[in-house]
Amino acid sequence: MTDTTLLTWINAEVERALNLVQDSIAKFNAMPDNVAVLQPCPEHLHQVSGALRMVGLAGATAVCEAIEGSFAASLGEARPSAATMGVIDRAVLALKNFVGELARGHADVPLRLFPVYRDLSGLLGKTTISEKDLFYPDLTINAPPHASPKAVAEE
């Protein structure tokens, strides 16, 4: 269950960090030989994933960690491709919008992030992914009582 008060409080910092990542990607796209502009991105993403974990957003945290992993993998290349940076940039935007919507009262439905999660997983070489990877039902809600309960004999 998400603590909406805490989420509202951290939303500005999450948005700021994700904006810094987007700005770095834009600078890299403008000057693809300057891979150094991407170096701070994994640290910003790591801070975001910690904040998301702190407020109980397991699905958003999984997506953020996939973005972080994709960055780490792409920085291991001589120069990340435009396609790779495009996937990462779309995922950052989707995550930023998702968290912003949650802070404004929308329901926590991480399955909405599955398309970008699938694309990120492809960058990481994962082939066995499914929607259930982002399925985190709220288990704090108890089932309603049965309308006409019957006692079961002990034997």
Image (cartoon, helix red, strand yellow):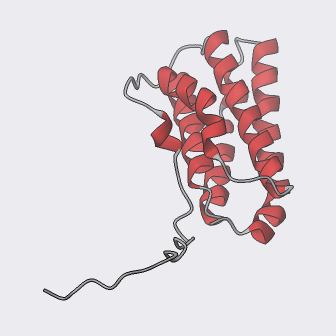
Count the labels in the image: 0
Q: Residue at x 62, y 45 (%)?
A: 110
Q: Is residue 121 left or right of residue 93?
A: left
Q: Position of residue 45 (x, y in %)?
A: 65, 44
Q: Position of residue 107 (x, y in %)?
A: 73, 53
Along the horizontal axis of the image, is 138 left or right of 103? left
- Name the side, left or right, on which 128 lies relative to 123: left
Q: Is residue 141 above or below residue 36?
A: below
Relative to the observer, which residue lies in front, 116 or 51? 116
Instruction: Using the image, determine if residue 61 lies above or below residue 131.
Output: below
* Residue 39 position in % (x across, y down): 65, 33
In the image, farthest residue toward the bottom:
154
Residue shown at 46% from the left, 41% from the top? 132
What is the quadrant of the N terminus in the image?
bottom right
Task: Residue 41 in the image: state x and y as whole percent.
Answer: 68, 37
Q: Which is nearer the eye, 31 or 136?
A: 136
What residue do we see at 67% from left, 59% from top?
51
Quadrant location, the C terminus? bottom left
**Does 155 sit left or right of 49 as displayed?**
left
Give me the residue at 57% from left, 48% from top.
Answer: 59
Name above or below for residue 16 compared with residue 142.
Answer: above
Position of 152 relative to 54 (above/below): below
For residue 93, what is the image quadrant?
top right
Question: In this rendering, does residue 150 appear at all?
Answer: yes
Front residue of 108/121: it is 108
Can residue 46 be seen here? The reply is no
Q: Quadrant of residue 13?
A: bottom right
